[in-house]
Amino acid sequence: MSRKCINDPNCFCYVCGELTFKKQRRNFTNLVMECYHQCFGFSVAHQDKSWAPHVCCIACVKNLTDWKKGARPMPFAVPMIWIEQRDHVSDCYFCLTDVKGINYKKKNTVIYPNLSSAIRPVSHCKKLPELILVATTSVENDNSQPSTSSVSDAKIKEGAVSDEHGERFHQDISDMEKRYQGKWSPNMLADYCWTIKRDQPEAKYSRKS
């Protein structure tokens, strides 16, 4: 895109997508990137792109490191999914999020859009249970990703879902595996997130073509 966004992308957390004030911003360390990779099954990306945040908030840093220690679950099962925006008018998270006059006390009043280029985190639910540590070939290798079948099998073995929901989850993952050649990717997760939102009548936003 030719012009700058209304708000600096680095005013938002890469992980949760929320407005992050300067004192709350943290750069990605190797530890945080490793925790992110293990928790969500794919690596922190787009750090060389101007259209994605390059920072995370202190809350997400703590949540990820605590998750790795087994101290607490992550507050969501899928983090923000960032894709390059088409334009600044209808598909830019940083232009459409109104933060004018917002201070720390009013931070929780910010309304965030859910866009094709910026899909908000998906919370834990019966259809998408809490992510668990899945054995991967190499956490240090940014290109290594668990197969969709290994992730879904692990969830069922751990008893994270009932037989009924497990069967539905397996079917969804199987469909995604065929479409994306068996590998997790931001595009695959974005597609699956929208599938979940489509199946939930209470979902506030709908996908824009």
Image (spheres, rainbow, N blue to C red):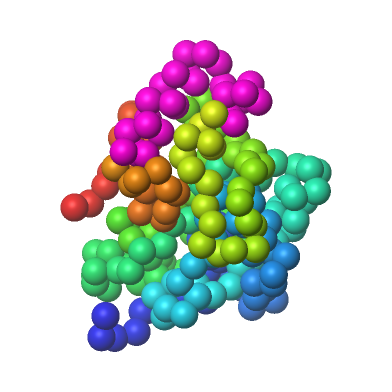
Q: Is residue 106 left or right of residue 66?
A: left
Question: Measured along the vertical axis of the image, is residue 130 above or below residue 8?
Answer: above
Which residue is pictured at 33% across the width and 69% down the height? 84
Asked if 50 appears above or below 92 in the picture, the reply is below
Where does residue 51 sit, x and y in percent of width and height? 39, 75
- Who is closer to the viewer here, 119 or 142? 142
How many numbered tags mark residues here? 0
Which quarter of the rendered picture does the N terminus lie within?
bottom left
Q: Tell me if residue 169 is in the magenta stretch.
A: yes
Name the residue at 27% across, 73% down.
88
Residue 54 x, y percent position in the rendering: 54, 75
Residue 130 image point, x, y percent = 60, 35
Q: What secondary structure is the stretch in magenta mostly built from? A: helix
Give the side of residue 191 with respect to residue 81, left or right.
left
Tell me where the magenta segment starts and ends, as one range: 154-178
User: Which residue occupies the foreground of this view, 58 or 44?
Assistant: 44
Residue 95 picture location, percent across and down: 35, 71
Is residue 171 among the parts visible in the rendering? yes
Q: Residue at x 51, y 62 (%)?
A: 143
> Up-down: is 90 above or below 152?
below
Above or below for 58 versus 133: below
The quadrant holding residue 181 is top left
Residue 3: image quadrant is bottom left
Considering every residue shown, the one lying at the far front of the view is 137
